[in-house]
Image (spheres, grey):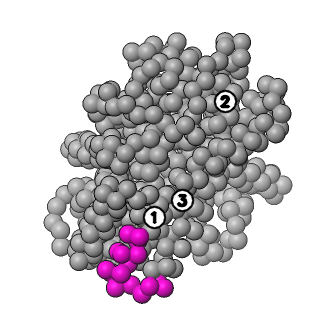
Amino acid sequence: MPLLIVGIGILILLLLISKFKLNAFFALLITSFVVGLLSSMNLMDILDSILKGIGDTMGKIVLILAFGAMLGKILEESGAAQTITLRMIEFMGLKNIQYALLITGFMVGLPMMYNASFLVLVPLIFTFATTTKMPTIWLALPLCSALSVAHCFLPPHPAPTYVAFIYQADVNKVLLYGLIPMVPACLIGGVWYSRFFKKMDVMPPKELFHERHFEKSELPGLGISILCAVTPIILMLIGAVIDLSFGPPPAKTELTKLGIENITGFYHQLFAGKGFSEQSNSLITYFLTILKFLSDANIALFVAVIVAILTLGLRNGKTMDDVMNSSAKSIGAISMIMLIIAAGGAFSQVLKDSHVIEYIRSISDSLQMNPLLMAFLIASVFRLAVGSATVATLTTAPIMLPIAQQTGTSPELMVLATGAGSVMWSHFNDSGFWMFKEYFGLSVKQTFQTWTVMESTVGVVGIITVLIMSVFI
């Protein structure tokens, strides 16, 4: 019954948006109430779920969205994005531009959260499209496929890193093994599939990108342009290296169980008794804590915006008023996107509170199949139901752990199979779906044809590759 309610909710959402042309923000809120009522939830409970979903979603990504939009706008208006674009074209050649974008997506997406890396790189897609006259979606799919695979398959991203510990897998092996399915998944789901959209004529919203032709003398230098673009990447990569070297800090509840008050205390305890003096131990702890703070996506993007303001703004002769006005416009341009993403969070929360997860867990015990395939299917159902790839991954792992241990299945491959399932079926309750739709100016139908099919292709190719790998591992 819960899965039927989810199906009815998705059908209502489709009708409201496609048939009645209702804005996705309103359609998601209405559908959230309908699904709650069909699930026999109290009206006030539905309202609480919606408010919680909005608060939780925006609390996690609002600063990332805002700083990412500001950074993207500064890169665009200063000509820095165009400088990087032209040099990439010169280095790789136009015929290899998709592979250049795929590699860029992997390098950027490995340390950065999907939303942050998408917002940093999307201005480059717009610039490539206008500069080279190449189709926007043909350029976007290889990049986004790499970002998705990095987010769902590979440490140091939170979900694969966390479930690696649940499955008792070696994080370094997960990263190493994950590179194997990533290659065919991105080549097929990104590069090959994009060939079907070379004639799709779409334009980014004018509020988000304005084509501007710079004289060569107006363009900033390559070094400063790359510095502003990769500052958040470098900072977040430092945090990833710390986690891989010393292990990620436990969650606040786990710290409390261990009798530790904060992450600083965790690092202090980590190095205690390793031959360091108390003073040296304190200095190492303090240093690592600062680096972890700077590596947070919100802080890393904030620092990048400050660097961009100082180097691409003020040093290029712009006044602070000019830079601030431009930044304000960038926030205004994504305001509706923020509301749509928030409403998607509300929809996800209602689905969670209507006990869909408990229902799936109850029927999973009766399934008899390959544990890798089972993990893939369960994660894909959660992804369909709740929208979040991270939630799908984190929820599937505890269900599959006893089965994986009983059958002796490789824990590293279990992480990858779960990640492959979590990337499937992206639709209305996934923020990535709405970001792709709104930023590239697509209709709902076009978003399903491009984004949803690309994501699902990546997932299917991923699980097929993992099943082949299981023969040898």
Tag nearer the camera, 1 or 3: 1
Q: Residue at horizontal 32%, vertical 26%?
A: 198
Of the 4 image quadrants, the one containing the C terminus is top left
According to the picture, the residue beneath numbered tag 1 turns out to be: 26
Q: Residue at horizontal 33%, vertical 81%?
A: 39
Indicate the position of residue 281 as horizontal and vertical percent values: 77, 54
Indicate the position of residue 312 as horizontal and vertical percent values: 74, 29
According to the picture, the residue beneath numbered tag 2 turns out to be: 77
Q: Residue at horizontal 79%, vertical 56%?
A: 282
Q: Residue at horizontal 45%, vertical 39%?
A: 440
According to the picture, the residue beneath numbered tag 3 turns out to be: 339
Residue nearer the viewer, 351 or 473: 351
* Residue 243 falls left or right of residue 201: right
**Separation of residues labelled 1 and 2 (CA atoms):** 33 Å
Q: Amino acid at mark 3?
A: Leu
Disc count in the image?
3
Using a 10 Å C-alpha cutoff, classify the residue at mark 2 as few (fewer than 14 neighbours), some (14 to 19) or many (20 or more): some
Highlighted range, magenta: 30-45
Of the 4 image quadrants, the one containing the N terminus is bottom left
Question: Cβ–Cβ below 8 Å for labels 1 and 3?
Answer: no
